[in-house]
Image (cartoon, helix red, strand yellow):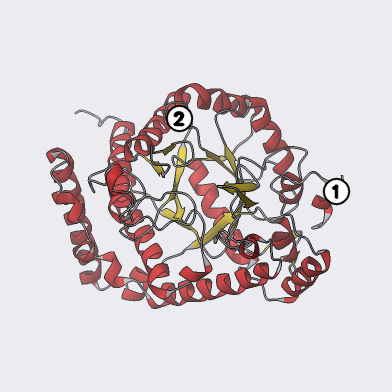
Amino acid sequence: MSWSPESWKTKKIAQDVAYDDPLEVAAAVDALRVLPPLVTSWEIDRLRGFLGDAQAGTRFLLQGGDCAETMSDCRAEVIVDQLKILLQMSLVLIHGGRKPIVRIGRFAGQYAKPRSSPIETRGDLSLPSYFGDLVNRPAFTAQARRADPRLMVDAYHHSALTLNFIRSLSAGGFADLHHPEAWDLAFLRHAALDPDLRASYERTCRQLGEALGFMEALGEVTVDQLTRVDFFTSHEGLNLHYESAQTRHVPRREGHWDLTAHLPWIGERTRALDGAHVEFFRGIRNPIGVKLGPKVEPAEVVALLERLNPDDERGRMVLITRMGASQVEKALPPMIEAVQRSGRTALWVSDPMHGNGITTAGGIKTRSFDDVLGEVERTFDVHAACGTILGGVHFELTGADVTECIGGASGVREEDLGLNYASACDPRLNYAQAMEMAFRISRRMAKTRRNSRPPRAVG
């Protein structure tokens, strides 16, 4: 079957945007086509190599950020907070896993969100749902909820500003963020934290600080080398007008590249084999993710790999499972076993957020820290039992002190949710919860590493 950046238009489009003016859409797409790319094919290839390493178990992927970016949050302090939490979490994971971490942010493009219903009703008024700042605005008015094609160009510019700042920070160094003494670890003093865990977390921080100080004192590694870090970008490739407009040939390289992000992914609601999103994604050279919920048939997982990665290229496919803590042990093993039988390969990643949503009696969406952690731990267990590798984790999180998820040593309770619930869509782990999650995963990785060591020879 022939493919082009526009061939997706011949397929059924899940989560299609109801634009009311085709000429406005065409004008926005034409504008995007001539703008410089947001990322480069060389960066994408570098990430593909790292993902291949994670697939083999020699690296680990940490992917995280906002559920839905907003253009109003394209501010220095917000971006720094996101990089800070990813960097600090990654250092904790390095300590436990003793392997490099691939840092991928849900930023610089995560402006579109799928919705369970295209219509939202409040009282007697029904309006289009909010599909993210790429499509419309959150205010519950007819004007704000109109799908506006010009927002695609606005989102591009905000993504470019975000990436420019990220690259400047990465080039300039994050020395102050490397040092554990600069971290906000007040949650370690919370009475609810098990004393053994507290001692383990404090020991980890102390050892990290000592190791970083020792490396700097040696003088053989420059401060520049110590502080330069790679950050890659990702978002759900939901709006195919936006994605295809930035998809192009690159001089002296084969194929088409989606240059809106390093790692775009297909969502749970848009992964139909005969749908527009699979059609678009099968033709781009980027590594790509696919979200998999508990109801996907194992044969469908194999069919997706065959369609999206027919040559079984290393580092191409990221299977992001989002089962729900209560479903992991039942739903995940058949998928893994089907992929094993097929002989195909992929990087397995756990998204423990999206299968664990709950709604309070007052109608507030939230998630339980214990459920999120439970899904991660059970996913590790399932992969260990199947003889496969869990190569990464995918979180909705923020470096801010929000109150959107309950539980954890931070002590957020259901009655606290209204204190600082700032998410534009889904609830995120706050700084303390994200750091505690990193410590927990690090402990698990350290235990696995110790248990996998061959016994020492005697005599």
Question: Mark 1, residues whose alpha carbon is within 10 Å: few (<14), some, or many (≥20)?
Answer: few
Camera-side residue of 223 and 204: 204
Q: Amino acid at mark 2?
A: His
* Residue drawn at point x = 28 percent, y = 65 percent: 178
* Residue 19 appears left or right of 76: right
* Residue 304 appears left or right of 102: right
The answer to which of marks 2 and 1 sits earlier in the sequence is 1
In this rendering, the answer to whether 262 lies above or below 348 is below
In this rendering, the answer to whether 406 lies above or below 48 is above
* Residue drawn at point x = 27 percent, y = 29 percent: 455
Across and down, in percent, residue 278 comes to 72, 44
* Residue 451 appears left or right of 25: left
According to the picture, the residue beneath numbered tag 2 turns out to be: 383
Residue 334 seen in the figure: yes
Across and down, in percent, residue 311 comes to 72, 42
Camera-side residue of 236 and 441: 236
Q: Secondary structure at mark 1?
A: helix
Disc number lying in front (2 or 1): 1
Across and down, in percent, residue 352 comes to 44, 39
Where, by quadrant of the figure, is residue 335 drawn?
top right
Q: Secondary structure at mark 2?
A: helix
Please count the marks in the image.
Answer: 2
Q: Amino acid at mark 1?
A: Thr
In this rendering, the answer to whether 291 lies above or below 51 is above
In space, the residues marked 2 and 1 are separated at their CA atoms by 38 Å
Across and down, in percent, residue 200 comes to 17, 44
State the mark number for residue 10: 1
* Residue drawn at point x = 31 percent, y = 74 percent: 223
